[in-house]
């Protein structure tokens, strides 16, 4: 009881204790035995991607298909809240927050790095050619498009419907009540589900925190000469952990909302700068060609377990991404549910599926297309750099544009701001899951989970770098796939019941 009062009077001790029991060993064991931690991480990764790749690939495609069917059916007219409920946030604030939470730092890291990886080492055909460039952007669209946001929709819709339409606590477990009943959802099994949701969130978010730290250190190295050492990365994580804790403590309507609006505005500025000073005609042609290829190949890509006939590539790239989105789904779904009160089911699904994906496509086409042009027509070496230094892709591309110093500074600011936004929204959601779905959580609990996120990210980055971070997301997401299928079934049942009643 005293411990509950110290952190939060609404703290669910069982959920909190078991979540800590799953998380803290990573800090202790990883800190004491980093090499052993890295070895175990690699073995787990190899097993999951070889034995369960089919489950990730087919599940994510079916989640997207189910979301579209719900949106286009008469069920789409149902409100997330009362029938006369008005949205709490404007559309631009709503979009900015859901985009910042759902993609954030990952998009800034991968918008050049991933297309260049596929450009130099494509899953099929010769690398370094115009055809390879088109396929590289098509692959990026597939990984960052509707499939990613379909995963978020499944969780977010279930939670928003349960929370605002049925008046239940904002918990994954309670959203399953239509299937198992209220008492079962609130009992021991329900608490175990909430623990898994926290576990998946932590493992997914620390992946992005680690990627962000890598890119911040690379950016500071390119612009300020900061050494690229493990100590520097840990110091960056420590500093930004402090920033996102401060933002999370300030709440959604202040810190998170304002930072999200700032993030999107700065992304638009950087996009326009690249379009204005980069190869504009080539960027537009690349975007159009790759988008056409993506839409044409989408059905084939969605329902196969061996993309482009390359099984190893599929496991190393697509399975990782699907696992990453699933690991992010508990916190992103819970967060976009929290900010979507008053929207219709149709508006919620279609906006979440389409607008962030299109914005991501434009951003990656502009930045990635510029990098392609530099390598194809100006003798650049960005592709060669990316093969050994993923996090340096953005800043190496910036060197070929005017005002490198200014752009590098703005890029560093954007990375840090996205870093903070993703982490503070995750900290808020984890704290809410720990307090029986409370929308108002004690600042001390937010600080505790913020420190835990930063600590796990630092340990994994030290233990095994990018590989350990990828493994964390896959391990964290694996148990949550089954829960997502249950959430989808509960959502459909609840929507059908509501539709018949009204």
Image (tube, grey):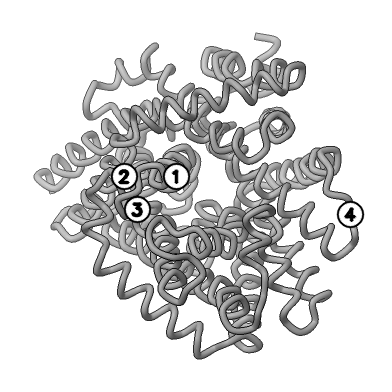
Q: For this rendering, which residue is in front, 452 or 295? A: 295
Please say if the residues under marks 2 and 3 sit with CB atoms less than 8 Å apart: yes
SS for tag 2?
helix
Q: Answer left or right for 227 relative to 314.
A: right
Please say if the residues under marks 4 and 1 sit with CB atoms less than 8 Å apart: no
Residue pointed to by mark 2: 60
Please say if the residues under marks 3 and 1 sit with CB atoms less than 8 Å apart: yes
Residue pointed to by mark 3: 147
Q: Spatial distance from mark 2 to mark 4, Cα to Cα?
A: 40 Å
Residue pointed to by mark 4: 226
Quadrant showing the N terminus: top right
Can you tell which quarter of the image residue 235 is in? top right
Residue pointed to by mark 1: 325
Task: In the rendered structure, find residue 43 and report the number of the disc placed on it.
Answer: none
Task: State which tag comes first along the sequence, 2 or 3.
Answer: 2
Residue 409 against residue 303 in the figure, above or below: below
Task: State which tag comes first along the sequence, 2 or 1.
Answer: 2
Q: Spatial distance from mark 2 to mark 3, Cα to Cα?
A: 6 Å
SS for tag 3?
helix
Residue drawn at the location 29% of the way across and 34% of the way down: 55
Residue 263 against residue 374 in the figure, above or below: above
Mark 1, residues whose alpha carbon is within 10 Å: few (<14), some, or many (≥20)?
Answer: many
């Amino acid at each position: 009881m005293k411990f509950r009062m110290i952190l939060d009077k609404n703290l669910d001790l069982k959920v909190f204790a078991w979540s800590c029991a799953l998380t803290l060993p990573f800090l202790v064991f990883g800190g004491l035995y980093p090499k052993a931690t890295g070895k175990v991480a690699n073995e787990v990764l190899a097993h999951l991607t070889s034995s369960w790749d089919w489950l990730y690939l087919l599940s994510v495609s079916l989640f997207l298909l189910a979301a579209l069917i719900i949106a286009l059916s008469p069920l789409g007219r149902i409100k997330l809240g009362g029938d006369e409920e008005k949205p709490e946030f404007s559309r631009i604030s709503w979009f900015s927050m859901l985009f910042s939470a759902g993609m954030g730092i990952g998009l800034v890291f991968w918008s050049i790095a991933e297309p260049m990886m596929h450009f130099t080492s494509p899953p099929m055909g010769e690398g370094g050619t115009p055809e390879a460039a088109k396929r590289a952007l098509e692959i990026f669209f597939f990984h960052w498009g509707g499939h990613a946001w379909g995963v978020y929709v499944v969780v977010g819709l279930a939670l928003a419907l349960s929370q605002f339409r049925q008046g239940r606590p904002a918990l994954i477990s309670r959203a399953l009540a239509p299937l198992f009943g209220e008492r079962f959802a609130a009992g021991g099994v329900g608490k175990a589900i909430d623990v898994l949701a926290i576990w998946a969130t932590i493992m997914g978010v620390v992946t992005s925190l680690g990627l962000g730290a890598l890119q911040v250190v690379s950016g500071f190295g390119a612009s300020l000469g900061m050494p690229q050492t493990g100590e520097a990365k840990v110091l960056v994580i420590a500093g930004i952990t402090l920033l996102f804790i401060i933002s999370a403590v300030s709440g959604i309507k202040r810190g998170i909302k304002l930072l999200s609006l700032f993030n999107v505005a700065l992304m638009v500025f950087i996009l326009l700068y690249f379009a204005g000073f980069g190869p504009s005609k080539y960027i537009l042609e690349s975007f159009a060609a790759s988008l056409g290829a993506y839409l044409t190949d989408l059905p084939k890509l969605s329902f196969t377990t061996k993309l482009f006939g390359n099984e190893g590539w599929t496991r190393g790239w697509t399975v990782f991404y699907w696992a990453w989105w699933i690991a992010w789904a508990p916190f992103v779904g819970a967060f976009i549910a929290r900010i979507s009160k008053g929207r219709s089911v149709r508006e919620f699904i279609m906006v979440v599926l389409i607008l962030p994906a299109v914005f991501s496509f434009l951003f990656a086409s502009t930045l990635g297309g510029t990098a392609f042009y530099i390598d194809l027509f100006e003798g650049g070496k960005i592709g060669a750099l990316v093969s050994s230094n993923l996090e340096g892709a953005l800043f190496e591309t910036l060197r070929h544009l005017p005002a490198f110093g200014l752009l590098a500074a703005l890029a560093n600011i954007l990375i840090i701001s996205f870093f903070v936004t993703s982490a503070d929204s995750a900290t808020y959601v984890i704290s809410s899951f720990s307090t029986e779905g409370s929308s108002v959580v004690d600042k001390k609990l937010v600080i505790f989970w913020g420190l835990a996120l930063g600590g796990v990210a630092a340990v994994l980055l030290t233990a095994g770098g990018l590989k350990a971070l990828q493994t964390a997301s896959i391990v964290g997401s694996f148990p949550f796939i089954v829960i997502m299928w249950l959430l989808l079934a509960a959502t459909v049942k609840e929507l059908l019941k509501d539709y018949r009643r009204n």
